[in-house]
Amino acid sequence: MDSREILEALVGFDTTSVRSNLDLIDWIEGYLAPLGADITRLPSSDKQKATLLARMGPATAGGMMLCGHTDTVPVVGQPWTRTPFKLSADNGRLYGRGTTDMKGFIASALAVAPLLAQAHLLRPVVYAFTYDEEVGCLAVRDLALHLENLNLRPAAVVVGEPTEMRVVRAHKSVRVLRTTVKGRGAHSSRPDAGASAINAMARVIGFLDAMMGDLASSCDVDEQFDPPGVTVNVGTVTGGTAVNVVPADCEITWEYRCPPSADRELPLTSVSSFIRLEVEPVLREHARNGGIKTEVLADVPALDARKNAKAAALIADIGGLEEGQPVAFGTEAAGLLESGMPSVVCGPGSMAQGHQPDEFVDEAELDGCDRFMSDLAGWAQSVEVGQSATGSR
Ligand SMILES: [Zn+2]
C-alpha cells in the first residue's frame, strides 16, 4: 500500500479525542505484524485508548523514532463541505479530518514499513503512535518511561506535526487552566446579601489581562518567537443564572504560553497570590464558604532548541531538509525531549489547515514525506566507519 491508500484507511476511523482509538490501532497492528514488527501496546488508564509502539530492526538504542498522535480534533460545529471521515482527492489536495494533523505523517511512515522489513537494518526504526495529544499530550510520559526501561533510547525522534517538512526545533510551553469562583447567591435587589462570583472573576480576568502586558515586555522574551514574550488568553467564561440573581458561580478556562527561557511557573504563582491576597478576602466578607480554585488541565513544556541540536542536524542530514522557524503550537516533542529523548518536529502539510473544516494535505507534501521515509530507510541500513548513530548521506 502506498501512503495515500494508508491515509484513506486511517481517515476512515473517527478518532476524535473523546473516542477510543483502538479500532485504528488494531488496523495498524494488523498491517505491521505480518512485516515482523515487534509490537507493544501501552494502554490508557481506562483501557479505551492505547499507544502503539512498533520496532522494525534490532532492539538497540541509537535508532530513529517516528512519533505521531492518532487522535484528531472534533468536526462538530465546523462548516465541512466534504465528508470528514472519508478521504477525497481534488486538485492536488487530499481532504479529510486528520489529513494534515497528523495522519498524513503516520501514513507515510507506515508506507515505508515493507521496505524496512526487507532490508537488513543496523539501527531500529521505531513507530510510536499515541492518543490524547489534542487534549494535552497525555500519553507522552508513559511512552518515554517505557522506552527508557527498554533501553531503546533513539538517536533522534521525529514528531510529525505539520511543518511543511522543515525541521523545527522550538516552540513555547502551553499551560491550560480552569479557574472557578464560588460566591453566594442572593436576590439582585440585595447585592449586599450575596457575593457575586462574576464580579470576583472580573477582577481575576483584569489581572490576567494586565499580567499579559507586563510579561510580554519583561526580560523573558525570546526574539525567535512571534510574539516574542509570554501570552495569556481567557478562552471561555460561564456564570450566573438570571439578570435578577447575584451569581454564585463563575468559571473561566484560560491558557498561557512561555518561551523556553521564561519561568513557566511565574504566571500561575502571580495570579494565585493575587487571588489569595486581593480577591478571596473580599469574596469571603459576604460568602463564608466562598472560594476560588485554579486547576491545571494540561501542561505541555516548551521545546527547547538548546537541547536538540544534534538530533536536528541528523534528521536534516538524512533527508536533506531545511530548518524551520519555531511553531506556534505545543507538541509531544517537548515532553519527549524533557524525558531525555532528542526530539524535533517535522511533518507534511501546514498547521494552517490543521483543526480546520475541509482539512487537507497537499499531495506534494505527502510525496516529500515519502522521500524522507525512504532516505531514512537508507540511513537505518548504512553504517559509517568510526560512527554509529550519525548521519551518513
Ligand atoms: Zn497534531
Image: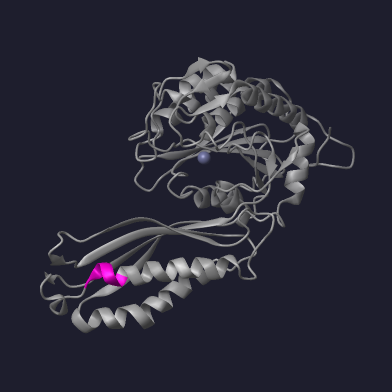
Q: Main secondary structure of the magenta part?
A: helix
**x, y percentage for residue 367?**
66, 22
Confirm whether residue 265 shows in the render. Answer: no
For residue 283: magenta?
no
Give the quarter of the image for residue 22.
top left
Note whether residue 30 is visible: yes
Q: Which residues are magenta?
A: 196-200
Answer with left or right where residue 313 lies relative to residue 147. Answer: right
Which quarter of the rendering shows the N terminus? top right
What residue occupies the far right of the structure in this picture? 385
Say which residue appears at 69% left-offset and 44% top-offset. Answer: 156
Residue beneath the point at 15% across and 75% down: 191
Front residue of 264/374: it is 264
Residue visible at 22% across and 84% down?
A: 285
Residue 380: x, y in percent? Answer: 74, 32
Q: Is residue 377 above or below residue 44?
A: above
Count of residue discs: 0
Q: 281 or 334: nearer the eye?
A: 281
In the image, residue 176 above or below residue 275: above
Residue 279 or residue 269, whichever sits in front:
279
Q: Quadrant of residue 185?
A: bottom left
Above or below, 58 against 36 in this view is below
Classify residue 183 as left or right of residue 20: left
| Chosen colour scheme | one colour
x, y percent for residue 32? 55, 25
Residue 358 picture location, percent across and down: 45, 27
**Quarter of the image with the C terminus in it:** top right
Give the side of residue 167 with respect to residue 77, left or right.
Answer: right
